[in-house]
Image (cartoon, helix red, strand yellow):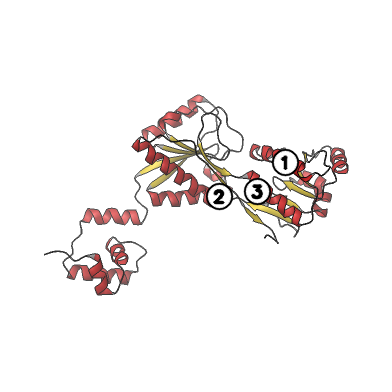
Amino acid sequence: MKQPSFRQIAQKLGLSASTVSRALHKDPRIRPETAKRVMDALKEEGYELDPAVSVGMSKIRQRSFYRESIAWCGTAPRESCPWFEPMFQSAEDYGARLGYKIEHFSFERDSSSNFQQLSNKWKAQGIKGVVLGPFKDQQRNLSFRWRDFAWVVIGQPFEDPALHSVGRDYLADIRRALDWLKKQGSRRPCFLQQKESSYAYKNPLLLSSITNYNDSHANIPTPCFEPDDTNPEALRTWEKQNRPDGLILPHYPSPKLQRLLQPLLDTMPVVFLTSPNVSLPSNHAYFQPRFEVMGQASINLLHRLLFNRELGIPSYKQSIYLDSNLVADSVD
């Protein structure tokens, strides 16, 4: 006797075919009473399901089954980077939907033997894809076995090898910061570098300061300046020569530097490129990087690379740059 189709059983119960299928495979999203109705109807119709298939599909629905693992490797253990947790969690959730289990690794010693040990461990575990980063400092001499894996780097891309990358679009964020400052009445916005800032901020700030100076036709001799908290006189001289009326900073300053900058912070609109841990006045704004989207994008890119690798399709370097959310009292 031919077994009834899901659609026929669904019509009989007044449910959708997808609901019947999910109930059959023990999808946790289906309410117990609905699942019981479906199973009773299936039993009445003489429907039989291979137990092995049922268990396997149930594991997939509950994300407890993975087809393979991928590595996520940085310069510090995951628990020491709580600000990146939204990115890690988003990557794990999205990876599970694609059948990947993410395993975290870190390296602290910049030595070839350390990189070779990690490469050997990944090879032994059957890992074929690796996400690298984010890195606080620029990495130049990582001697992994590059040809053995598919790679995606978070943050600034490597020059050699030319890896696929997912990162923040700093230049786009700075352009938005300048637009916001101008809407607050700023006509002479300037950029302040900070010694403790990540390398990722320094070049975009310098490049943006040069571009803005050329476009604005304002007489600003030194649009980008790095204050020294041990030399307040240099800051006063810079302020007198450039007369800034708006500022862009990589992040909220340290207590010592804050005391030096406080007269400027109190009198003009300011944008921080990272989220501060303090409350801000209404004429200050900050950016919130979209870490969740970065996590998903990195796994999606690595998934496509692994798929192409299996088919023998050559891949070209791909870079995904994401702008951030500008948080302010008044944002158009």
Mark 1, secondary structure of its residue: helix
Q: Mark 2 points at which residue?
A: 291
Of badges 2 and 3, nearer the viewer stands 3
Residue 257 in the image: state x and y as whole percent: 78, 44
The residue that mark 3 highlights is 173
> Do the residues under discs 1 and 3 have CB atoms within 8 angstroms?
no
| Position of residue 80 measured from the top left corner of the image (x, y, whole percent) | 56, 44
Q: Earlier in the sequence, mark 1 or mark 2?
A: 1
Q: Where is mark 1, residue-wise?
A: 211
> The C terminus is located in which quarter?
bottom right
Find residue 197 and report its image quarter: top right
Q: Could you say which quadrant of the image residue 260 lies in?
A: top right
Residue nearest the observer in this picture, 256 or 131: 131
The residue that appears at 40% across and 52% down in the rendered structure is 97
The part of the image, by quadrant, that contains residue 229 is: top right
**Real-space CA distance between mark 1 and mark 2, rounded to the nearest whole angstrom:** 28 Å
Choose the circle earlier in sequence order: 1 or 3. 3
Q: What residue type is labelled 1?
A: Thr
Examine the rendered structure and indicate whether residue 22 appears above or below residue 147: below
Residue 274 in the image, given as x and y percentages of width and height: 66, 49
* Mark 1 crowd level (few <14, some 14–19, many ≥20, 10 Å Cα): few
Q: Residue at x 61, y 45 (%)?
A: 169
Alpha carbons under labels 2 and 3: distance apart: 15 Å
Decide which of tag 2 and tag 3 comes sooner along the chain: 3
Q: Distance between the residues labelled 1 and 3?
A: 14 Å
Amino acid identity at mark 3: Asp
